Image (tube, rainbow, N blue to C red):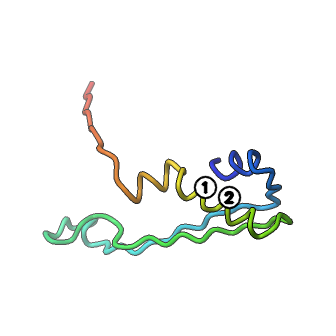
Amino acid sequence: MTARFFAGSLKVDLEEYRVDVEGDINIMGFLKGDSGIRPSFQGIRVTVHVKSKAPQEKITELLTMVESRCPVGETVLHGTPVVVRHIVT
């Protein structure tokens, strides 16, 4: 969503834009709740695939803008306070 939005404002025609995300997790933190093992990813890798006839400079400008303004990336990289409410009915 972020890439498509900014591509339009930069006049970059995206033929294809895909983001692959993979991560490393120690499943024992999830399954057993072992102390010292967080039930989370220890590392996350993101690969962005772009297909466009736009000049490389415009693509670089777009990718820089997306990385600096994407709400998902910002949340993962810098965390966001979370408030959990439980409602049992």
Residue at left offset 60%, top offset 55%: 66
Could you tell whether 86 is left or right of 12 in the image? left
Quarter holding residue 42: bottom left
Crowd class of label 1 (few under 14; some 14 to 19; many from 20; radius 10 Å): some
Q: 86 or 68, which is in the foreground?
A: 68
Residue 74 percent across, percent down from the top left: 45, 53
The amino acid on which the numbered mark 1 sits, given as a three-letter code, is Met
The amino acid on which the numbered mark 2 sits, given as a three-letter code, is Leu
Residue 21 percent across, percent down from the top left: 54, 67
Kindly identify which residue carries mark 1: 65
Crowd class of label 2 (few under 14; some 14 to 19; many from 20; radius 10 Å): many
> Circle 2 sits in a helix, a strand or a loop, which is it?
helix
Q: 7 or 20, which is in the foreground?
A: 7
The reply to whether the C-beta atoms of the residues labelled 2 and 1 are less than 8 Å apart is yes
| Mark drawn on residue 83 | none
Quarter holding residue 63: bottom right
Kindly identify which residue carries mark 2: 62
> Circle 1 sits in a helix, a strand or a loop, which is it?
helix
Label 2 and label 1: CA atoms lie apart by 5 Å
